[in-house]
Every structure is written in C-alpha cells, then in structure tokens.
C-alpha cells in the first residue's frame, strides 16, 4: 500500500525525492519505493525521515484503517 | 536518538541497497559451496580420483561450512531453545550413520573395492572422531554466543 502521507509531507516541505534522499542519506530509489509501499524501511530510517519532514512516526507511518 | 553506525564496507551504503547486496552475496555463497560440493562428488565418484587430487577443495568446503554453521549458532540465526543431550546424540548419530553409509557406498559400491567391515570401520572412525569434535565446536560457539547476547541484554 502506498505511503501517501509521506509523499504529502515531502511535497509540503517542498522537497523532491532526491532532496529527501540526500537529507536521509539514502538513495532516491529507496524513498520512491517507500512512497509506493514497495519497501519497508527500518525503524532508524523511519525516524530519520520523520525528523527531516518535521513529523512524528505516527503522522507518516501509522495507518488507522490498516491496523483496526 | 543517536544510532550506532555500521562498520565495514557497507558503512556509507543505503540500507535497502545493503540488504539487496547481502542477499546476493548469500545466494552466491550458497551456490559456491554447492558447486564445490558437486565438484568434490564428481571427482570422487564419477572420475574416481584420489582424495589427494581434490583435498584442497574438500578442506576449503568443509571449513567454510563449519564456519557458516558456527556463525549461525553464535549469532542466534539457528534457533536453539535448550541444549538437550538427547538432541545432540540424535544429531551425532545421524551424521555418523549417514557418513558410514556414504563411506560404505563409496568404497564397496561405486569404487567396488570390496573392503571388509574392519577396513570400512578404520575409515569410519575418522567420521566418528571428526563429527564429535565438530559438534563440540558448535556447542562451544553456541554457548559463547548465548553468553554474549545475555551480556548485551543486561547492559
């Protein structure tokens, strides 16, 4: 399932996938795959992404519909 | 939260790429070991070569496999809940029986040397001794790994 919340947060911050990737020290492909829901990042990477995008882990990675 | 940096060749590599690289390395490693096993079996059984002619490959393969299993046990990749004497004995006897059957088939069926039980036993004794040492080595590293893990959890 694609991660729309992360994509929206990135766009809100006016960052491209490459910018976010550089800030998180990963490749653009990794960010793209996370947004498409095709790669499960480690908790460390989730925390890095959340910090860069000024969001909490819940804001970006918690899906109420999926867990209930 | 400051995370611990990984040391080694993957220090600056993206976590996804690192995962993929490690998977490829693991597959290639298994293929290499299987190929070496195949080479040893072909040289031994199909070509009927003496052990001296492929000893290096055989030793390398055995040492590699022993280190792989030891690593798995040390880092807890192979889940061992409790060491039971009965399980260790079962594994030991299984390896010895399979080794003995292989030795018998190799000398008396494939190579057709018609060795007596006594002569076969002289060769099987190596299997019995090496298997015992190997299992002791595995148990030692399993216990060391367990102790290390418990220490880390206590910190």
Image (cartoon, coloured by chain):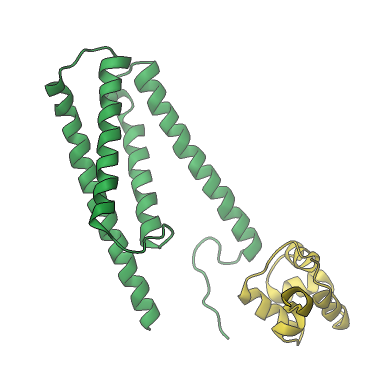
| Residue occupying image coordinates x 79% and y 68% | A35
The colour chain B appears in is green
Chain identifier, yellow in the render: A
- Which quadrant of the structure image shows residue A5? bottom right
Q: How many marks?
A: 0
| Residue occupying image coordinates x 85% and y 83% | A13
- Which quadrant of the structure image shows residue B141? bottom left
Q: Can you say whether B75 is above or below B115 in the image?
A: below
Position of B15 compared to B120: left or right? right
> Of B151 and A17, which appears nearest the observer?
B151
Q: Can you say whether A65 is above or below B58 in the image?
A: below
Tell me where residue B125 appears, x and y as whole percent: 16, 34
Position of B41 compared to A49: left or right? left
The quadrant in which the N terminus of chain B is found is bottom right
| Residue occupying image coordinates x 65% and y 74% | A45
Tell me where residue A17 appears, x and y as whole percent: 81, 70
Q: Can you say whether B74 is above or below A48 in the image?
A: above
Q: Can you say whether B25 is above or below B41 in the image?
A: below
> Of B24 and A58, which appears nearest the observer?
A58
- Which quadrant of the structure image shows residue A55? bottom right
């Amino acid at each position: 399932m694609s991660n729309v919340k992360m994509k929206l947060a990135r766009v809100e911050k006016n960052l491209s996938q490459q910018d976010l990737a550089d800030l998180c020290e990963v490749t653009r492909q990794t960010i793209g795959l996370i947004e498409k829901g095709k790669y499960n990042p480690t908790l460390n990477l989730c925390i890095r992404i959340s910090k860069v995008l000024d969001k909490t882990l819940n804001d970006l990675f918690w899906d109420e519909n999926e867990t209930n | 939260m400051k995370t611990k940096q990984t040391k080694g060749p993957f220090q600056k590599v993206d976590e996804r790429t690192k995962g993929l690289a490690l998977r490829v390395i693991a597959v290639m490693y298994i293929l290499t070991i299987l190929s070496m096993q195949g080479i040893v079996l072909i040289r031994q059984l199909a070509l009927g070569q003496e052990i001296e002619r492929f000893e290096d490959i055989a030793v390398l393969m055995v040492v590699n496999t022993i280190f792989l299993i030891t690593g798995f046990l040390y880092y807890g990749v192979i889940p061992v809940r409790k060491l039971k004497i009965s399980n260790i004995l079962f594994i030991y006897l299984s390896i010895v029986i399979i080794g003995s059957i292989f030795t018998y088939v190799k000398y008396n069926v494939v190579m057709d040397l018609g060795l007596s039980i006594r002569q076969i036993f002289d060769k099987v004794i190596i299997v019995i001794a090496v298997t015992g040492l190997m299992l002791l080595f595995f148990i030692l590293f399993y216990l060391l790994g367990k102790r290390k893990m418990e220490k880390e959890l206590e910190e």
